[in-house]
Image (cartoon, rainbow, N blue to C red):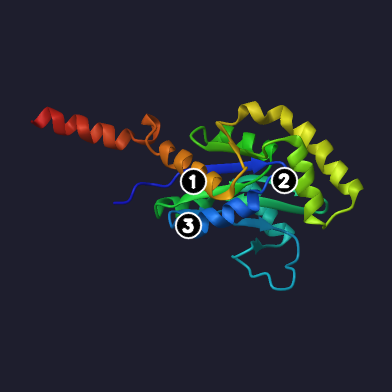
């Protein structure tokens, strides 16, 4: 029987490279699954239900909230987004480590509800490097970049609640660091109680 997967939350400032890291991690290792969120927003061209998101009606989303079927949820602009509990648990039972890419407030809610969740915060080597990456993307105006940097300054207040900080300087090195930290979590005593009890039982029979 494969070992049950764990829940991993990865957060980070906009521009820290979370998306690139997740893509590289999933391409290199087969034991990870990226959580798929439910949303009330309409699909964009090319998006597939169950791949990018589970697209649901507002009434259905409301029923998911009422039935405690979401690990966490939040409202952005006029739409709701949430992490379906069934999907996460199904992947974990398959032995996959499930990764959620969400913001600090959602991460802290999950940690409170599921204390064994591993919280990882991805950071650039410096604030100057963060600004440089945002500028080099060339997709946003300087006003938007300044707003993102201001938000990063506000988010920096909650980082102490995370289990580990991962510095995204060189992508391959960072992917290996993420993988090492996640796999080490499997060997925490709280995650190996079945194995510990099995060992105790075997020892009494020797």
Mark 3 and mark 1: Cα distance apart in space = 10 Å
Q: Report the residue that reaches farthest toward the bottom.
A: 46
Q: Is label 1 in a helix, a strand or a loop?
A: helix
> Circle 1: is it few (<14), some (14-19), or many (20+) Cα within 10 Å?
some
Numbered badge on residue 28: 3
Numbered badge on residue 74: 2
| Front tag of 3 and 2 | 3
Q: Position of residue 199 (x, y in %)?
A: 21, 33
Depth check: 160 or 82 in front? 160
In the displayed structure, does residue 86 sit left or right of residue 14?
left
Work out whether 15 lies above or below 128.
below
Who comes first in sequence, dot 3 or dot 2? 3
User: Which residue: 74% across, 58% down?
Assistant: 58
Q: Is residue 69 visible?
A: no
Find disc 1 in the rendering and name its residue. 176
Mark 2 and mark 1: Cα distance apart in space = 31 Å
Q: Position of residue 11 (x, y in %)?
A: 64, 41
Numbered badge on residue 132: none
Who comes first in sequence, dot 3 or dot 1? 3
In the picture, residue 188 is in which quadrant? top left
Q: Report the residue that reaches farthest toward the left.
A: 206
> Circle 3: is it few (<14), some (14-19), or many (20+) Cα within 10 Å?
few
User: Which residue: 53% across, 45% down?
Assistant: 173
Mark 3 and mark 2: Cα distance apart in space = 31 Å
């Amino acid at each position: 029987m494969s070992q049950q997967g764990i829940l991993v939350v990865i957060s980070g400032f906009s521009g820290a490279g979370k998306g690139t890291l997740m893509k590289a991690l999933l391409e290199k290792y087969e034991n990870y699954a990226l959580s798929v969120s439910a949303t009330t927003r309409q699909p964009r061209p090319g998006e597939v239900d169950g791949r990018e998101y589970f697209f649901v009606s507002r009434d259905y989303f409301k029923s998911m909230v009422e039935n405690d079927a979401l690990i966490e949820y939040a409202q952005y602009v006029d739409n709701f987004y949430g992490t379906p509990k069934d999907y996460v648990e199904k992947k974990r039972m398959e032995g996959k480590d499930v990764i959620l890419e969400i913001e600090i407030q959602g991460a802290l809610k999950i940690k409170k509800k599921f204390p064994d969740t591993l919280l990882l915060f991805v950071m650039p080597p410096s604030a100057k490097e963060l600004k440089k990456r945002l500028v080099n993307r060339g997709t946003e105006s300087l006003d938007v970049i300044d707003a993102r940097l201001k938000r990063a300054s506000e988010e920096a207040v909650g980082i102490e609640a995370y289990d580990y900080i991962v510095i995204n300087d060189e992508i391959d090195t960072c992917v290996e660091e993420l993988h090492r930290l996640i796999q080490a979590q499997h060997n925490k005593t709280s995650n190996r109680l079945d194995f510990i009890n099995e060992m105790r039982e075997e020892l009494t029979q020797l």
